[in-house]
Image (spheres, helix red, strand yellow):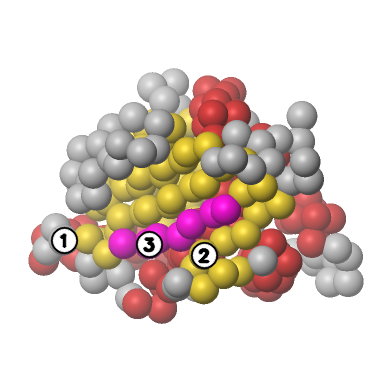
Amino acid sequence: MAFDIEAAIDGKRVSRAGVLAWENRRITASAKVLGIPVAPDADVASRREELMQAKLSIGAEGLLDRFAAQLRIADWSAQLGSRITTRRAFVTADLHVAGGSAGQLVQWFDEQLNLNNQAAMLRACPDHYVLRTDSGGRQQVVQAIGASPMLNQFFLDYGSEEGLANPREPQYPHQIVASARLVDGTLIGGARMQFRDTRTGFFARLIEEFPLLTPGFMIKQQRWHTTLEFSNWAEAAHAQ
């Protein structure tokens, strides 16, 4: 059976081609942030790989140094917002996948975390800058949330459901779940990605939780971000 992905974003069906068009625009934006050339007329897969290799060449420490001032400002803003309210804004998207299985995706993803496969993490979305797993299994994330011009940093504790507002749904036997904290330990949200097999493949219900004061335009764009990264990870998991 052919492998294909159709997304549901803002209640509208979006083809794989539509999601890749969004990725192509974000590749251009990320390359501009980094001040590097990425072949403008190449196909999306080639541009994706070129951008990812550039980020690996700069290295996690180099990227952290380059954007240190931005990350301090973003961290201060997130701390302030968490003191005002602990309520959450939700980023939701669905994937209808023809071919493959939910278990294979979740198993593959867990393996990449355990291997600290930074290439697999960065390749998933142009707005990823640093995604690396420490010895305790916590993942450091530096990304442009919701296509924001300013980068943000947080730490994901996979397996932890602390502070999550949306409960697990029993019809989904597979999940990827994590709580998100700032560098000082402030709890700011997390993610619950749930998966179940279907007759023709599998279905993914993707839900991320961000501070309630996150601007609406960022929440809207983050739906595309989340759709893209899990679509790319789903393809990678079933490419073997």
Locate residue 174, reporting x and y percent.
43, 32
Residue 122 appears in the picture as rendered: no
Do residues under tags 2 and 1 come within 8 Å of each other at their CB atoms? no
| Residue at the spot of label 1 | 87
SS class, disc 3:
strand
Q: Are marks 2 and 3 in contact (CB under 8 Å)?
A: no
Residue, x 64% and y 43% (percent of image)? 200
x and y percentages locating residue 107 in the rendered image: 55, 26
**Residue annotated with mark 2:** 8
Taking 58 as reference, is 73 above or below it? below
Badge 1, how many Cα within 10 Å: few under 14, some, many 20+?
some
Residue 36 in view of the camera:
yes
- Closer to the eye: label 2 or 1: 2
Inspect the image, locate mark 1, and give the three-letter code of the amino acid beneath it.
Arg
Q: How many marks?
A: 3
Q: Is 95 covered by the magenta stretch? A: yes
Residue type at mark 3: give it: Val
Which residues are drawn in magenta? Answer: 90-96
Who's the residue at 47% across and 65% down the image? Answer: 223
Nearer to me, 70 or 188: 188
- Residue position marked by numbered label 3 in the rendering: 91
